[in-house]
Image (cartoon, rainbow, N blue to C red):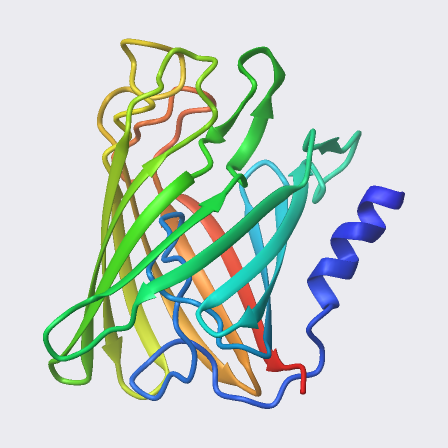
Amino acid sequence: MKKLAFVITLMFAALPVFAQGSAGRDAKFEYRSLVDMPTAGILEKGFVGQTTDVLPYGVVIAKLEVGVFTNVSFGISYGGANIIGSGKIDWYKLPGVNFRIRLLNESDAFPAITIGFDSQGKGQYVDSSSRYQIKSPGFFAATSKNFALLGYISLHGTINYSLEANDGDDFVNMMVGIEKTVGPSVSIICEYNFAWNDNKQYGNFGNGNGYLNAGIRWAIGTGFTLGVDLRDLLNNKRLNPSSADRAIRLEYIKSIF
């Protein structure tokens, strides 16, 4: 019950909020991730963000982030499998921690560049391999650039090294992604995780196809952004295989001043 109370606290810590969300042409806040991949986005100093992911097999992950300094943010996350459903909850072994530092702000000539660390993976946690079904990003460097095109189109790229390497897949990995705004409050996103650190040759998790994820984000007002995702469109995962897993994300951001 203490663990459940901790997750609920993270889910509601940012209430209430009075600002536009992070989707669409009129978005006030930057994405810190698309579906799974980190971007170069960062919370502004003095803002707190809460994100809840609801995934297959009753997985719920709550993350709380705070912009503590200019271009510096920290966060903590926690969750588990079978939280939604019946029977015993399979809590994650440890909370996830994340931090990010913006090295370069975006300009007309250069993209934004951010480095950071995130130990929160996705899906079920497998004790025998000491890893999540979808590995955490670990250490990462991300770049993002926005272009005006019937609203905005944003391009993202990330290089990462996960510390979940007990399965023998300890390669440096790469992810790429794109966002396209659709009107003032809706965005469509897509990302591809090459999963070089998660393939069939070295374990029982990935088939070597990489992870293709897509989603839609809707800034529904008063600081909320609602997301619906389709995950693993290439049917890459070998643990509980199925294509186009459905997931929901709810983001909540506000100023703490």
Number of labels in the image equals 0
Counting from the top left corner in percent of width and height, residue 4 is at 81, 47
Quick check: 46 above or below 123? below
Residue 86 occupies which quadrant of the picture? top right
Whether residue 59 is visible, yes or no, is no
Of residues 157 and 203, the one nearer the viewer is 157
Relative horizontal placement of residue 99, taking residue 257 as reference (left or right):
left
In the image, 62 versus 110, the foreground residue is: 110
Q: Quadrant of residue 58?
A: top right
Name the residue at 45% across, 21% down. Answer: 239
Reply above or below: 141 against 198.
Answer: below
Task: Look at the image and tell me whether residue 146 can be seen.
Answer: yes
Residue plotted at (37% across, 64% down): 102
Residue 71, position as x, y percentages in the image: 44, 70
Name the residue nearer the viewer: 129 or 75.
75
Q: Give the image location of residue 72, x and y in percent.
A: 49, 65
